[in-house]
Amino acid sequence: MAVEWTVLIADDEPAARRGVRQLLAPYSAFTVCGEARNGAETLTAIDRSQPDLLFLDVQMPGIDGFEVIRRRTPERMPIVIFLTAYDQFAVKAFEAQALDYLVKPVTEARFAAAIKRVTKQLRSAKHAPPDQAIVVTTSKGATVLHARDIDWIESSDNYARLWTGGRSYLLRQSMRDLEQRVAADGFIRAHRRALVRIAAVKELATTTNGGLVARLQNGATIPVSRRLRAAFTAAIRGQTA
């Protein structure tokens, strides 16, 4: 099979970089286009080689893996698989939109599962919309929500309340920041305090006083402000066209 995708390996340990190369060797669709020993080299290498996949060590000298993503921004990153000797960074890794999180030493079976996920995403990248992973804290611990599963989001004081099915989760993030975060996943403002996932809308209906509401697949009814009515209606029509 001809090479389809390129890989950058960023880790300050030479043995770890060799280990990734060895694990990657059976997968002929991937080829290593470069290595980096620290965060600064990683940022330069991403700009230079534009890899499809980045194996990124969490703890590196100077600029760590999370800071690499923060400086470049998640939207401009390749697919990221974090590498680390510790498992306590898992939640933070998914908050940083990593596709997977591998704890060293990585077994062949665990590596194969990660490559399977990467391959699926790369093959569908041109057809599938982005899918933001959002980590929320509950009484039972951290939960990862995917944007495609969230029906709508409402402002709740200093928090945002994320509704998925009949359940809701609180996230300490402003609506403005959250709107930018999920815009690529098909969310649009319904009114000042609500964001709605376009694909979750079942129908638009006019109220007795001439207002507009969006009825969602989960049964929720969200009013649409007059100021946003035209843009909201156009987005829904574009989804169903």
Image: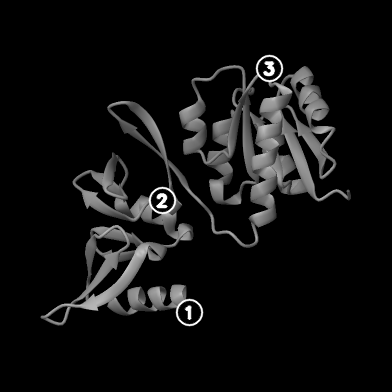
For numbered disc 1, what is the local secondary structure?
Answer: loop
Question: Whole-Å distance between the Cαs marked 1 and 2?
Answer: 22 Å
Q: Amino acid at mark 1?
A: Ala
Q: Residue 33, located in which quarter of the rendered image?
A: top right
For numbered disc 3, what is the local secondary structure?
Answer: loop
Residue 3 is left or right of residue 138, and the answer is: right
Residue name at image x 33 percent, y 68 percent: 202
Residue name at image x 56 percent, y 38 percent: 98
Question: Whole-Å distance between the Cαs marked 3 and 1?
Answer: 49 Å
Q: Amino acid at mark 2?
A: Asp
Against 51, residue 201 (above or below) is: below
Residue 143 is left or right of residue 153, and the answer is: right
Whole-percent x, y for residue 240 in the image:
45, 75
Marker count (numbered): 3
Whole-percent x, y for residue 212 in the image:
22, 76
| Figure coloring | one colour
Question: Whole-Å distance between the Cαs marked 3 and 2?
Answer: 33 Å
Identify residue for label 3: 105
Instruction: From the viewer's side, name the closer residue of 200 and 76.
Output: 200
Q: Residue 137, located in which quarter of the rendered image?
A: top left
Identify residue for label 1: 241
> Residue 44 got which mark?
none
For numbered disc 2, what is the local secondary structure?
Answer: helix
